[in-house]
Amino acid sequence: MFKKYLIPFFVVIPLSFYLYIDHTFWLRWLKRPADSEVLTSWQWYSPIEVIENRELIPLSITKTDNRTISDDTLESAVEYAKSFNSLALLISRNESLELEYYKEGYNRNTIIDSQSMHKGILGIATVIALDKNLIPSIDTRASDYIPEWKGDKRQEITIGNLLYMTSGLKQIEYNNSPFSPGQRLFFGENIFSLVEKIEYAFEPGSSFDFNHINSQALHSVLTKSSGKRYSEFLRENLWKPLSGSFAQVRLDRKDGDARVFCCIQTKAMDWIRIGSMLANKGKLDGVQVISEKWIKIMLRGSSTNPNFAMHIWRGSPFSGGRLLSKPSGRIIPVSSPYLKEDVFFIEGRGGQRLYFIPSERLSIYRSGEINFAWDDAYFINLILNGIDNQ
């Protein structure tokens, strides 16, 4: 009789204790939405921290007779977006909307998850900190803000290495199992513990390797250099200057760290304001959010990957593919060269995009169903072909 209950005792009790001490992770992991719902289902996650919440101020709308992009082109853009079950498609030129499309049931006030587009916001915020001399330079060592990295090879990692994804830090193993360390990056409570303990895999600055941990490490850099919470820094230095309406971030725990490698939630109009600012040399509505000097620096590619700037992708040069990781050899196919050499974009999983083309003062925001077949070059060239510059 004793043996009958012995095994359950030694299995159930430790398992129950493990689930109890890690209950927040399990609650989040079990409640996470499917890909089909992930863009507009954000209430399942807690806690969140609001960056800004005020009345939406739309960009001005270009009158039909004054549009610089042909009606046929705009119609084709919408049809392509619809074919990928898009939720929103906004196109602005010269800081004025030429197209504003929402799928039925969605509108200007719909809050949409960004997926990895958050990395672009993080990159912009870090550049603002550099522009304001809160961070001395891109050559400043990250260990000045993450002292746990001192004493080994990680102390050589610079802010530039983190921005350009050339830190040499090891990838966190990720798969669909809840016991995968990568799942803790998305759903765990103490995200900084992953940052401080991460090992290095190769010489800093020697190779490009797109890695979530580079982005999360920048959270420590930004908050410690500014002396502000991440949400406070974004509110004061990005959302307020841009007259943004709404944004919120996920925290790992109450009053904890923001998850900055993924999943900021905001509205389509906030994104198109950001894109219009970037397409106009860092200025929107007369407010210089980022200096022209730092806009130029931010958009330069690196020697290890000319298609990647400071957490922002570059359309040129064309090679038939975008390098995602040199160590693993992962490359994302690119169907054709872009018609303009200054195509830039902030990328989120499965076709979430903010494009901007400074030479055309053009910005485009698209959000929709997770689908990796979305063709950036085809879509952007379609629009570029329809511009009338006369």
Image (spheres, helix red, strand yellow):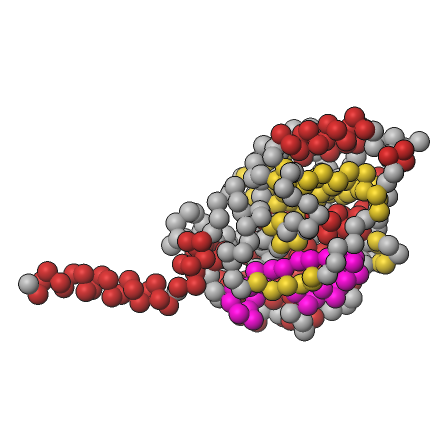
Position of 305 compared to 236: left or right? left
Name the residue rendered at 49%, 66% in the picture: 190
The part of the image, by quadrant, that contains residue 329 is: top right
In-front residue for pair 307/186: 186
Q: Quadrant of residue 181?
A: bottom left
Q: Residue at x 61, y 40 (%)?
A: 368
Q: Quadrant of the N terminus?
A: bottom left
Number of numbered markers: 0
Residue farthest to the right, as pictured: 390
* Whether residue 215 can be seen here: no
Q: Is residue 60 above or below residue 4?
A: above
Residue 317: x %, y % from top left: 72, 36
Toward the bottom, the furthest residue is 227
Q: Residue at x 62, y 49 (%)?
A: 112
Residue 5 drawn at (x, y percent): 13, 63
Magenta stretch containing residue 244, yes or no?
yes
Q: Position of residue 150 (x, y in %)?
A: 55, 69
Tell me if I can see residue 255 in this picture: yes
Tell which of 314 and 18 is nearer to you. 18
Q: Is residue 350 above or below residue 161?
A: above
Magenta stretch contains residue 134: no
Seen as rendered, the residue at the extreme top is 72
If the image is split into quadrants, where does the C terminus sit? top right
Question: Magenta region: which residues?
Answer: 231-258
Answer with the quarter of the image where residue 306 lies: top right
